[in-house]
Amino acid sequence: MKGFWDILPTPIFVLAPMADVTDPAFRRVIAKYGKPPVIWTEFVAADGLARAPEEGRKKLMRDLEYTNEERPIVAQFFTANPVHMKMAAELARDLGFDGIDINMGCPDKTIEKQKSGAALIKDPKLARELIRAAKEGAGSLPVSVKTRAGYNKIEIETWIPELLAENPAVLTLHARTRKEMSKVPAQWELVKRAVEIRNEMGSDTLIFGNGDVKDLTEARQRVQETGADGVMLGRAIFGNPWLFAETVPTIEEKLKVMVEHTKLFEELLGDIKSFSIMKKHYKAYVTGFDGAIELRGKLMQTENAMEVEDIVRNFLEIQN
């Protein structure tokens, strides 16, 4: 069941799910200034949705808020519990999401202690159970998987066939192992091999590659080299909501959108998330121009959107 994936022309370039990055505020900014063909949510704990007290569950639900401008949008979940996976998929279906993705690649130790994320690479049987459970809960929605090339070593010859046997709509391969984290360059020849395995199996699952791609020009090159159906871009979006529009903003445009992003964060998430999350964005927005270092230093001392707006306004008045 591919759902909306069937009507998208390939190659498909999509935005990666990133914790404390692709939150509802930033997704709205991206959708406005450089919308990719598909957007993912941050990963959300299916266990929390199933078991957390009402207050905790409400906070998790905030991560699943989206606007029509962001569609098609895929809800990503992590869990090692098939029952909870089915419940999360049912919830996503009820919330009107366009697809569901299972995180089988996150190297965070807290996630792995729950036998979830990249830990699932060590348990293909459970991984397959989770895909089946997600499909059961998803109904007609397509189910996809994001994973890595192995745990301590390259395992795509065994791992990829296990996943493809469950016929996910899309399989996104981060071209590094869990052990490698992001400490070594992504090995895109592994994506090429995953495509070959898919073809050898006669599967119609779309294969996306992920890792170190800085822009759409490089993404197109990676598709040519590997035969992948698409590329997922992640860190390249930092400070650059225009990534998928392939436009270059002026410094003033960049700073004004940064302020807009900050206001949205405060409005949508200020009561449940630390303002310090925005600081990682300031490092990316404010770089590569005269006065950037001093401006960035001031922004790192801010505590709310009003302070950010005042500092940016003063900076632009001096520049003009």
Image (cartoon, grey):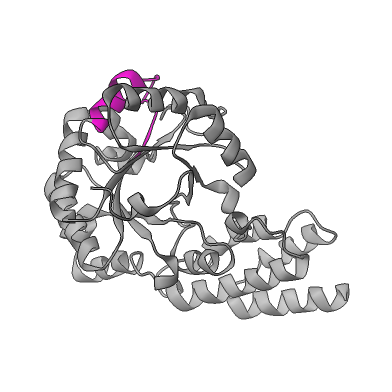
Q: Residue at x 21, y 30 (%)?
A: 165
Closest to the observer, 249 or 196: 196
Q: Position of residue 128 (x, y in %)?
A: 19, 35
Q: Is residue 192 above or below residue 95?
A: above
Q: Is residue 111 above or below residue 192?
A: below
Q: Residue at x 17, y 48 (%)?
A: 135
Q: Is residue 67 visible?
A: no
Q: Residue at x 43, y 66 (%)?
A: 70
Q: Is residue 171 visible?
A: yes
Quadrant location, the C terminus: bottom right
Closest to the observer, 120 or 142: 142
**Left or right relative to 291: residue 182:** left
Q: Position of residue 197 (x, y in %)?
A: 34, 23
Q: Position of residue 311 (x, y in %)?
A: 73, 75
The part of the chain drawn in magenta is 146-164
Q: Does the magenta-highlighted stretch encompass residue 147? A: yes
Q: Position of residue 151 (x, y in %)?
A: 36, 26
